[in-house]
């Protein structure tokens, strides 16, 4: 029986570790999808603007990730990875909204 429990405990630990990291999105694919659905600007301009926004959001997430509550990181990452349009902007927005609703975690610098 002990042989079956050990792999489960080890695997559970790996899931928590992976879920606690910033998810990796294919920005090019996301921005191509958004740009082709947009109207007004050219496809290249829309894609470039999208890539810029996504990269800025990712850079902010890298700097601020530890400030967000683990439960918020997990739930927002799950929301941001649903469907085909994975977005750092959506992930960051979700985390910022969670902080506004609940306030900053104890000990977080503003």
Image (spheres, rainbow, N blue to C red):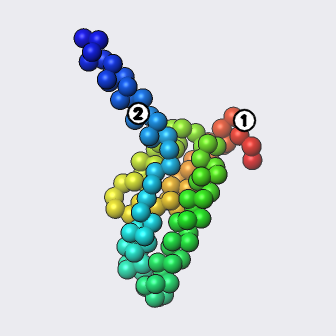
Query: Which residue carries the number 1 mark?
Result: 107
Task: Identify the secondary structure beneath mark 2.
Answer: helix
Query: Which residue carries the number 2 mark?
Result: 14
- Residue 37 place in picture, x, y as percent: 38, 78
Task: Identify the secondary structure beneath mark 1.
Answer: loop
Q: Residue furthest top?
A: 1
Classify residue 55 by image quadrant: bottom right
Neighbours of disc 2 within 10 Å: few (<14), some (14-19), many (20+): few
Residue found at x 46% / y 51%? 23
Residue found at x 48% / y 87%? 41
Neighbours of disc 1 within 10 Å: few (<14), some (14-19), many (20+): few
Q: Is residue 34 left or right of residue 45?
A: left
Classify residue 92 by image quadrant: bottom right
| Rendered view: 81 above or below 43 | above
- Residue 72 place in picture, x, y as percent: 52, 42
| Rendered view: 63 above or below 45 | above
From this viewpoint, is residue 97 visible?
no
- Residue 83 place in picture, x, y as percent: 33, 58
């Amino acid at each position: 029986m002990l042989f079956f429990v050990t792999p489960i405990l080890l695997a559970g630990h790996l899931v928590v570790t992976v879920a606690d990291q910033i998810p990796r999105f294919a920005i090019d694919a996301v921005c191509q999808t958004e740009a082709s659905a947009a109207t007004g600007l050219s496809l290249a301009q829309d894609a470039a603007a999208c890539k810029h926004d996504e990269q800025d959001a990712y850079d902010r997430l890298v700097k601020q990730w530890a400030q967000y509550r683990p439960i918020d990181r997990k739930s927002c990452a799950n929301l941001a990875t649903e469907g085909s349009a994975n977005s750092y902007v959506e992930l960051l927005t979700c985390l910022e909204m969670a902080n506004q609703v609940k306030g900053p975690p104890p000990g977080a610098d503003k």
